[in-house]
């Protein structure tokens, strides 16, 4: 009799655990809203979900097949994006491409029509905990004019019911270089100082991700560079992951290690910043990166583009003239500092002689210089 009872008990325990596992899997896939304690989230279950749902626990943020429409206007279509810890990820695109809507979907200000967002391997529910993990700064700063700098920074703590946070606020104000302005009001600050206050306020929730929606668009170039340097410093000191929304190439190329280009509601290209800037594949990417420099009267002209990959440090043009006896007509030249290395490209019209063209290509091959043919329509 005792043996029979033990068998029944073991059966019920096994069945109970199996049922819980099924509920958990459905919950994480988004099929049910049942809350399950994390103690049941064991390795075996995670691997099953990971294999079937392509969730990567190593990624800080994953966006899967996200779409958003306003009535019949499709603003985001099938967006997929992976963000690693400590990335400074730039989202680049023209006005109206869908950049701001994407970042508002990430923090829950807008609700997507379909698709999922995963944070640290778990489906986002946009609850209070997640909203504190993902902070945001805006183009217009959104400070309260009636409150001093210190009280603006303390606002998130007050709303959360947290007390005795003044020392923490002072620490972040010192970090952004505004500890001497704690009793000033927003009307007494410059645009750059207001954005520094907004950054300090965002840091009060100890976020893992900082969303920047055109955060420097209303600032002058010098102030923009100062804010970008500050964000880069925070990324390094606080292990802060940053997602930077902008239509300005100089903003993205200055601090971002990865870039996604969005056009007409879709991400058309994404990858390492240096790869996107040096080897743009889509027409919109070339338009944004070259900024119309190749739209010359040479509509049928064939050109060569040579790439500076951060390793070449020689006077290429002078060497070509000296070693090959070929004079090059430069159409476009640009260099960018990406991840503290100089990358660049030089585009020039091909020599009229086919013999000189082959001689030039062979010279580049011997010297290990990367090149490709382009045309004026790019």
Image: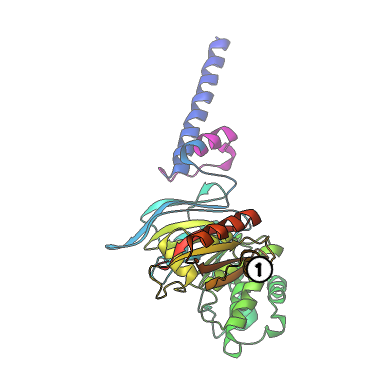
Could you say which quadrant of the image residue 179 lies in?
bottom right
Is residue 251 positioned above or below 362 on the image? Answer: below
Magenta residues span 31-50
> Residue 178, percent across and down?
69, 80
Q: Which residue in the structure is indicated by mark 1? A: 322
Counting from the top left corner in percent of width and height, residue 20 is at 49, 34
Q: Give the left or right position of residue 321, taking residue 245 as reference.
A: right
| Quadrant that contains the C terminus | bottom left
Percent x, y for residue 7? 54, 15
Q: How many labels does the image show?
A: 1
Relative to 60, does residue 97 appear above or below in the rendering? below
Which residue is depicted at the point 69% across and 68% down? 233
Question: Hey, which quadrant is residue 307 in on the image?
Answer: bottom right
Q: In the image, is 283 to the left or to the right of 7?
A: left
- The picture places residue 240, in percent across and down from the top left corner, at 64, 62
Q: Is residue 277 visible?
A: no
């Amino acid at each position: 009799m005792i043996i029979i009872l033990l068998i029944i008990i073991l059966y019920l325990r096994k069945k109970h655990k199996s049922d819980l596992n099924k509920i958990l899997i459905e919950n994480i896939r988004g099929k049910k809203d049942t809350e399950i304690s994390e103690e049941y989230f064991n390795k075996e279950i995670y691997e099953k979900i990971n294999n079937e749902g392509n969730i990567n626990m190593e990624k800080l943020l994953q966006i899967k097949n996200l779409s958003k429409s306003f009535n019949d206007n499709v603003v985001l279509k099938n967006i997929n994006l992976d963000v690693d810890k400590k990335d400074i990820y730039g989202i680049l695109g023209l006005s109206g491409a869908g950049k701001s809507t994407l970042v508002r979907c990430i923090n829950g200000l807008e609700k997507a029509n379909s698709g999922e967002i995963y944070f640290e391997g778990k489906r986002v529910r946009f609850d209070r905990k997640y909203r504190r993990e993902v902070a945001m700064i805006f183009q217009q700063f959104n400070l309260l004019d009636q409150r001093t700098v210190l009280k603006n920074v303390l606002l998130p703590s007050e709303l959360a019911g947290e007390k005795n946070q003044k020392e923490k606020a002072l620490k972040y104000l010192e970090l952004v270089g505004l500890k001497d302005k704690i009793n000033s009001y927003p009307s007494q600050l410059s645009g750059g100082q207001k954005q520094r206050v907004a950054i300090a306020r965002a840091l009060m929730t100890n976020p893992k991700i900082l969303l920047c929606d055109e955060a420097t668009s209303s600032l002058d170039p010098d102030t923009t560079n100062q804010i970008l340097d500050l964000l880069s410093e925070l990324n390094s000191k606080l292990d802060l992951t940053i997602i930077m929304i902008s239509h300005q190439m100089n903003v993205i190329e200055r601090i971002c290690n990865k870039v996604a280009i969005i056009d007409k509601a879709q991400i058309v290209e994404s990858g390492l910043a240096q790869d996107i800037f040096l080897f743009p594949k889509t027409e919109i990417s070339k338009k944004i990166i070259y900024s119309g420099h190749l739209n010359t009267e040479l509509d049928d002209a064939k050109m060569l583009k040579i790439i500076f990959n951060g390793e070449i440090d020689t006077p290429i043009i002078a060497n070509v003239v000296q070693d090959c006896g070929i004079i090059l007509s430069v159409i476009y030249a640009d260099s960018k500092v990406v991840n503290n290395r100089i990358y660049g490209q030089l585009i020039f019209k091909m020599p009229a002689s086919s013999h000189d063209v082959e001689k030039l290509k062979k010279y580049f091959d011997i010297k290990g210089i990367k090149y490709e043919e382009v045309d004026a329509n790019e």
